[in-house]
Image (spheres, helix red, strand yellow):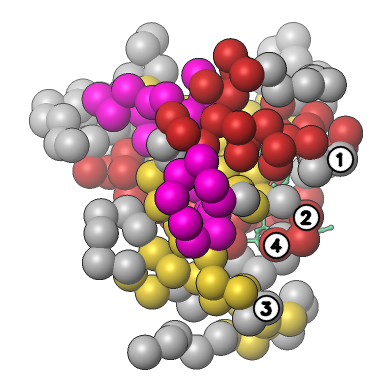
Amino acid sequence: MSAPLIASARHGPRIAPRHAGRPWTWVLDIDGESWLLRPIDPADAEALREGFRQLSPEEIRQRFLHPLTELTHEHALQLASIDPRREFALVLAHPGPPGASRIGAVARVAIDPRSGEGEFAVIVGRPLSGRGIGTFLVRRLIEWCRRKRLPAIFGLSLDDNAPMLAIASRLGFSRSSLIGEPGIVLLRLQLQPAGVHPSRREG
Ligand SMILES: CC(C)(COP(=O)(O)OP(=O)(O)OC[C@H]1O[C@@H](n2cnc3c(N)ncnc32)[C@H](O)[C@@H]1OP(=O)(O)O)[C@@H](O)C(=O)NCCC(=O)NCCS
């Protein structure tokens, strides 16, 4: 059964995802098209490169915090090949096998070896933005971090990135500036009481 769209006063139809019967996998109906939100796969590398070519320089700067003109095959393969013990990444893709499906959004989190906290990054391509997808993705990253019993999740954002700041604020992240990094803010959500260290790591 298809889930109802939830109307948003500010941004038109929002997405009501439904579970697809596999772990970390949902179906989203967006403007009459079915999209699959699923864990990333190494075979997605070329689709990541294609998706990157569709991004504006501003979107790239917001995601990577510096200009990047090309996503090389090696970089894309690295982004698509995750170590499940310390990383988690979801792609919003057209249905079809990895490698044969276009990608419209990506969200990832990796455990920072120094702090043990999860560092996240997310990108939703402009055609799909403003429907609650970014919020849904960050919620899933938080869920993964909670399952791993990580003390906190954090991400870096440009301080003029209104949509990212709106998501962070809505989900309860704190915001602080970084010494020596003008224009960049640290967004951080405490997941465990301070002083509690990860005692159990779940898959
Ligand atoms: C940031 C990003 C992921 C948001 O994705 P999205 O799917 O559009 O996000 P959502 O629809 O869940 O939420 C966007 C929120 O920003 C708000 N927003 C959008 N434009 C805004 C603006 N100009 N001013 C203030 N708020 C704005 C929306 O109102 C919405 O909040 P609401 O749900 O309370 O209405 C997307 O814009 C993106 O990929 N940007 C480029 C990469 C990036 O910036 N990544 C973040 C750093 S890693």
> Given the image, on which type of amino acid does mark 4 rest?
Leu
Question: Is the residue at mark 4 in contact range of ligand 1, meaning its CB lies under 8 Å from it?
Answer: yes
Distance, label 3 to label 1, CA atoms, is 22 Å
Residue 94 in magenta? yes
Residue shown at 33%/69% (left/top)?
19
Distance, label 1 to label 4, CA atoms, is 14 Å
Determine if residue 147 is in view: yes
Quarter placement of the C terminus: top left
Q: Earlier in the sequence, mark 3 or mark 4?
A: 3
- In the image, taking residue 198 as reference, residue 93 lies left or right, namely right
> Given the image, on which type of amino acid does mark 3 rest?
Asp
Q: Which residue is mark 4?
A: 128
Viewer-side label of 3, 2: 3
Classify 142 as above or below 171.
Answer: above
Residues at badges 2 and 1 in contact (C-beta under 8 Å)?
yes
> Given the image, on which type of amino acid does mark 1 rest?
Ser
Q: Which residue is mark 2?
A: 126
Q: Which residue is mark 1?
A: 56
Question: Is the residue at mark 2 in contact range of ligand 1, meaning its CB lies under 8 Å from it?
Answer: yes
Residue 40 lies in quadrant: top left
Residue 126 lies in quadrant: bottom right
Q: Earlier in the sequence, mark 1 or mark 4?
A: 1
Distance, label 2 to label 1, CA atoms, is 9 Å
Residues at badges 4 and 2 in contact (C-beta under 8 Å)?
yes
Q: Quadrant of ligand 1?
A: bottom right
Q: Earlier in the sequence, mark 2 or mark 1?
A: 1
For label 2, count other residues whose C-alpha is less than 10 Å away and answer few (under 14), some (14-19) or many (20+).
few
> Given the image, on which type of amino acid does mark 2 rest?
Arg
Q: Secondary structure at mark 1?
A: loop
- For the record, the magenta segment spans 78-101
